[in-house]
Amino acid sequence: MNFTPRFPNFLHGGDYNPDQWLDRPDILDRDVELMQAAHVNCVSVGIFSWARLEPEEGVYDFEWLDQVIDRLWKGGIHVILATPSGARPAWMAQKYPEVLRVNDHYQRYHFGARHNHCLTSPVYRRKVREMDTKLAERYAHHPAVIMWHLSNELSGSCWCPLCQEAWRGWLKDKYGTLDKLNDAWWTSFWAHRYTDWSQVEAPGGLGETSTNGMYIDWRRFSTHQCKTFMMAERDAVQAVNPDLLCTANLMERFWDYDYFDLAEGMDVVSWDSYPEWHSGDDVARAAEFAMNHDMMRSYKDQPFFLMESTPSQVNWKPVNKLKRPGMHLLSSMQALAHGSQSVMYFQWRKGRGAAEQFHGAVVDHDGRGDTRVFRDVTSVGKALEALQPLYGLEKRKAEVCIIYDWSNWWAIDYAQTGQKDNMKYFDSVNMHYRSLWERGVNVDFRDTRDCTDLSGYKLVICPMLFMLRESFARKLRAFTENGGTLLVTYFSGVVDETGNAWLGGAPYGLIDVLGVRATELDAIHPHDRQGLVLDGKTYKITELCEIPEMHGAQTLGTYAEDFYGGMACLTKHTFGKGQAYYLAAKVEQAGLDAIYGAIADELALTTALQDALPCGVIATERGGAVFLQNYSGAVQQVTLVGSYIDMITGEKVSGTFEMPVNGVMVLAEG
């Protein structure tokens, strides 16, 4: 898929901040030379440049940006042009204090930091539209500019009077009447019923803290405000040139907004990836970020952009460790394997001061182009050029889908039960994903919206689907009845989309499909002992267990300990033409591997390679090529039956060979 028709290539580059160096034209000239040497072909410009672009209200200065873009274009470097709405200039905060965000204690922020603007403010939306229009009129037809980068890492909520009024309007549209809102939020609890719309305020530290349905709706509303803000930016720049597509960079484990919903408002998804490599278990870390890549691909069911990564280290984590030799190429190729069309960095050149003074960059304070990091970046640029035949080729259609839903995540985190405030939804989903990723099985992610289509999958997995919409329960029934394989875990089908408990038993709408009813939920202390007994082996269970009541399902595995020892923990049930598994507890990774290994064999799931690979060596398919990746931290001996060409080096690969630490190959059949 070609998102940048002006330059149909894998993009390599990163965030470039020439406005920090306008007093050093020698450095700006040198930057282009270094970019060429590093095989950089694209940079993102203008992300935090508002104070330079509009130093006074209505007074614009684009001459410096003209020179920068022309210099880059002359040097063969393309531009992703950013809208600067992620941080407003001081004069705006001073003249229009309403553009500043209010926290949940009703305190208005002062000027400073970034992302502390009110997304509802008509003034801020107007000023953003004016700036975006000016930028588009000047640069949207420049041959160097290939895409729009909208704002930066959108985040947060605002409790100002403007947002409170918008919140009440959103609720009126959603519920229509106060009676329906009171029913949805179960406000009879603690006499919290509302009798006038003016009484409804956003939840927060000085107000309502115990109405789960309100909190869930507040997160939905916050997503809506962000989405309309972002789409207004998109519409402003595309009114000038609709051919330039727009992206907005998302983040890992981001909880504030529903990314499936937000992605609908952008043309292309991009994201910022910062794994903590070498922090104890690189295989686990790789599984986590492989899942993130596949989620980004799944939001719009198309390739995505890696908009930010670090060439070596960051400066904002508790331990800021350097990437070890080979890891930069390996982690960059992982993004490509899962569907990225780019490898971009924050940042191109380290700034001299402020918060990101020591954040990793391609060019360090010494300005050299012969450092280890610079060579690592160059190797990625060369690899992307060698892999150009894969451009436009996508991953094979997945046979497996994992359900991951933001409203469900919020509902789990607000629920006061089990491991309170520590239910680990993301981590639990990642464990299921990892079992398939290590086998080389391609996985999609979907949420529970009405538009979700399950019909093309062999296997659908629902980890901790606590919030289950009635319409989605019907989809899961139909999927199974028509021949699909369904796996549902503990803590599923408990509440409806408002966060109120379903009556009649859980998992709601699926008891006859699964052949079990969930009864009690037990929480496990770290010192407790519990296990799943499966095929003569015992696998450790932690955190959460459910006691299922059998309604026709076959017991595959049982609990090992406690008063429910010997009771079913893993079950299987035939329903229509399909089959449904129920896993009643959080089982360690080895146990999930055993469960999914059996299911994968039974369903004959397609894998990237048929060959048995050492632990920590992962095969991922894209466009018919196999990305072979070694995250094990050790040299590994690999044996392949077929004969291949490594597309990165051009060398032949077959038989038995040693794969180095952090090694990566892209194998095409030769």
Image (cartoon, helix red, strand yellow):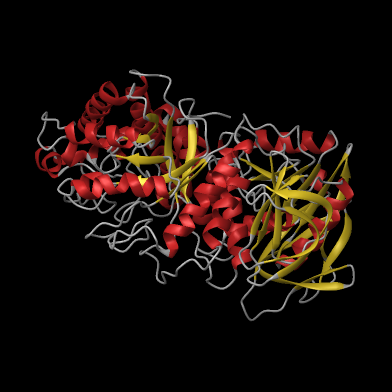
* Residue in view at x 61 percent, y 34 percent: 301
User: Is residue 179 or residue 234 the one in the foreground?
Assistant: 234
Above-or-below relation of 476 to 636: above
Above-or-below relation of 608 to 423: above
Image coordinates for residue 70, horizontal then vertical, percent = 28, 32
Q: Is residue 655 visible?
A: yes
User: Is residue 174 or residue 316 the one in the foreground?
Assistant: 316
Above-or-below relation of 629 to 480: below
Q: Quadrant of residue 173?
A: top left
Q: Is residue 292 left or right of residue 360?
A: right
Q: Is residue 316 left or right of residue 92?
A: right
Q: Quadrant of residue 57?
A: top left
Q: Is residue 155 left or right of residue 160?
A: right
Image coordinates for residue 510, horizontal then vertical, percent = 76, 43
* Residue in view at x 27 percent, y 28 percent: 132
Q: Is residue 500 visible?
A: no
* Residue in view at x 85 percent, y 71 percent: 566
Image coordinates for residue 441, horizontal then vertical, percent = 74, 49
Quadrant placement of the C terminus: top right
Image coordinates for residue 499, horizontal then vertical, percent = 54, 46
Total marks shown come to 0
* Residue in view at x 64 percent, y 32 percent: 452
